[in-house]
Image (spheres, rainbow, N blue to C red):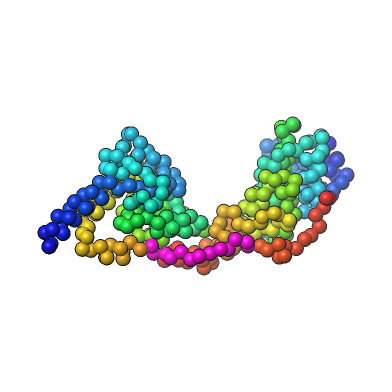
C-alpha cells in the first residue's frame, strides 16, 4: 500500500524484506528527500521518527540505510540508498528530521560522505585536525603518518 | 645541614605521602573500580586519598583511569599541566599503560599515556581490582618518602609533559563554498 503510493511518484529500484520482516526499499539518491518527506506526510504510514542512519562501505559502493519508524503502526521501514565510490555526496535530511544532524556528522566523520546543505558539517567523534576516514575498508593504521608516533 | 635537611624531608614527605589528593578523572571502565575503591568496602580514606578533587588546581595525583583517545589526549595534558607541583601520575589499567587490547590496529587510542605525560606507577590489569589500586597508592607513597628537597630540580625535570600542546583553532573543516549542490528531489 505504501509501496504503491511511493511507486507512483518515485522510481523504486528494489523492494525486499529483511530476515526479521522489515520492509526494505531501495531508491535512487536523488529521490531521498522526496521519499522521506512523503513517508512523513503520508497518513497511511505517518513516519514520525528517524531511528538511525547506517553507513556501510562495500568496496564497490557505499550503502546508506535510513531506519524510519512509525509509532502509529509500530513498524520500521528501511530506506536503502547506494552511493558511488568517487566523491560520495547526498542531500541532507536535517530539515525533515532534525535528529539526523549528528548521525550525518558521524557518517561524514568516519566515511567521508558529504551531506549537502547540512547546517554544521564538521567532525563529531574524531579530533578536528584528523586526516582520513578510518571506517573505510582501504584505511590502514600503518599508512597513517599521524599515528606513527603512537607505535615507537 | 644534611641532618636538618633530612629531618625536614622526613616530615615533608610524611605529610605529602599521607594526604595524596587525587583528581576526579575517569575516562572509562577503570573509573568504576576507582569509585569502588573510594567507597566504604575498600575505603581509600585509610591511606589519606579520599578527597577526590574536581579541579586539578587542588590535586596532587592524577589516576588516569581508562582508555585515553587521541581526542582526549590534549585534555589530559592540559589537566596535568594545571596541577601544582609536586604532582604524580598513576596509569591505571592496561589501556593507559600500553594501549591494551587497542594497541595494534586502533586508530583512536593512544598507546600508553607515557607518550603524553610522565608516569610514576603503572598498574596493568583490565580493569585492576580495588586492592591493586590501593597497592599502587602505597607504592607511590613509598616512592614519595624517598624524595629529598635537595633533588627538587631533578624531580621537576623528570615530571615535565612529554608532549607540548600546540594551539589549534581548526574549527571549520568544510567551507560552504566547497560543497557542490546537486539535485534535491522534491522540495
Q: Residue at x 32, y 57 (%)?
A: B85
Q: Is residue B55 left or right of residue B151?
A: right
Q: Nearer the viewer, residue B55 or A94?
A: B55
Residue B162 among those drawn in magenta:
yes
Residue A70 among those drawn in magenta:
no
Q: Is residue B109 left or right of residue B183?
A: left
Q: Residue at x 45, y 66 (%)?
A: A149
Report the magenta stretch's main SS.
loop
Is residue B124 visible to the viewer in this orientation of the structure? no
- Residue B99, position as x, y percentages in the image: 43, 55
Answer with the quarter of the image where residue A121 lies. bottom right
Answer with the quarter of the image where residue A5 lies. top right
Is residue A122 visible to the viewer in this orientation of the structure? yes
Q: Quadrant of the N terminus of chain B?
A: bottom left
Q: Residue at x 15, y 57 (%)?
A: B6
Q: Nearer the viewer, residue B49 or A133?
A: B49
What stretch of residues is rendered in magenta? B161-173
Q: Nearer the viewer, residue A146 or A122?
A: A122
Q: Nearer the viewer, residue B132 or B167?
A: B167
For the image, the number of numbered tags is 0
- Residue B175, position as x, y percentages in the image: 68, 63
- Residue A81, position as x, y percentages in the image: 74, 51
Q: Residue at x 31, y 37 (%)?
A: B43
Q: For the view shown, which residue lies furthest in the right direction?
A: A8
- Residue A104, position as x, y percentages in the image: 66, 52
Amino acid at each position: 500500500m505504501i509501496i504503491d503510493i511511493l511507486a507512483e511518484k518515485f522510481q523504486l529500484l528494489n523492494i525486499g524484506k529483511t530476515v526479521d520482516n522489515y520492509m526494505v526499499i531501495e531508491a535512487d539518491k536523488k529521490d531521498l528527500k522526496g521519499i522521506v518527506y512523503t513517508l512523513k506526510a503520508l497518513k497511511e504510514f505517518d513516519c514520525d521518527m528517524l531511528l538511525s542512519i547506517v553507513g556501510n562501505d562495500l568496496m564497490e559502493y557505499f550503502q546508506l540505510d535510513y531506519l524510519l519508524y512509525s509509532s502509529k503502526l509500530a513498524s520500521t521501514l528501511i530506506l536503502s540508498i547506494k552511493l558511488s565510490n568517487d566523491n560520495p555526496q547526498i542531500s541532507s535530511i536535517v530539515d525533515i528530521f532534525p535528529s539526523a544532524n549528528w548521525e550525518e556528522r558521524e557518517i561524514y566523520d568516519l566515511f567521508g560522505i558529504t551531506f549537502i546543505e547540512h547546517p554544521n558539517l564538521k567532525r563529531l567523534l574524531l579530533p578536528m585536525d584528523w586526516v582520513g576516514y578510518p571506517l573505510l575498508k582501504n584505511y590502514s593504521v600503518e599508512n597513517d603518518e599521524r599515528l606513527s608516533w603512537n607505535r615507537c | 645541614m644534611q641532618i636538618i635537611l633530612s629531618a625536614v624531608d622526613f616530615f615533608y614527605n610524611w605529610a605529602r605521602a599521607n594526604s595524596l589528593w587525587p583528581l576526579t578523572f575517569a575516562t572509562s571502565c577503570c573509573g568504576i573500580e576507582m569509585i569502588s575503591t573510594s567507597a566504604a568496602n575498600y575505603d581509600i580514606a585509610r591511606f589519606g586519598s579520599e578527597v577526590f578533587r574536581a579541579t586539578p588546581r587542588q590535586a596532587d595525583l592524577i589516576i588516569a583511569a581508562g582508555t585515553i583517545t587521541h581526542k582526549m589526549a590534549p585534555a589530559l595534558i592540559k589537566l596535568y599541566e594545571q596541577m601544582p607541583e609536586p604532582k604524580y601520575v598513576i596509569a591505571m589499567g592496561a589501556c593507559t599503560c600500553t594501549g591494551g587490547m587497542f594497541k595494534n590496529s586502533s586508530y583512536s587510542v593512544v598507546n600508553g599515556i607515557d607518550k603524553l605525560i610522565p608516569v610514576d606507577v603503572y598498574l596493568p590489569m583490565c580493569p585492576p581490582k580495588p586492592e591493586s589500586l590501593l597497592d599502587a597508592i602505597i607504592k607511590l607513597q613509598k616512592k614519595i618518602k624517598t624524595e629529598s628537597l635537595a633533588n627538587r630540580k631533578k624531580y621537576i625535570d623528570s615530571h615535565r609533559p612529554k608532549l607540548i600542546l600546540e594551539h589549534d583553532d581548526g574549527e571549520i573543516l568544510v567551507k560552504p563554498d566547497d560543497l557542490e549542490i546537486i539535485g534535491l528531489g522534491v522540495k
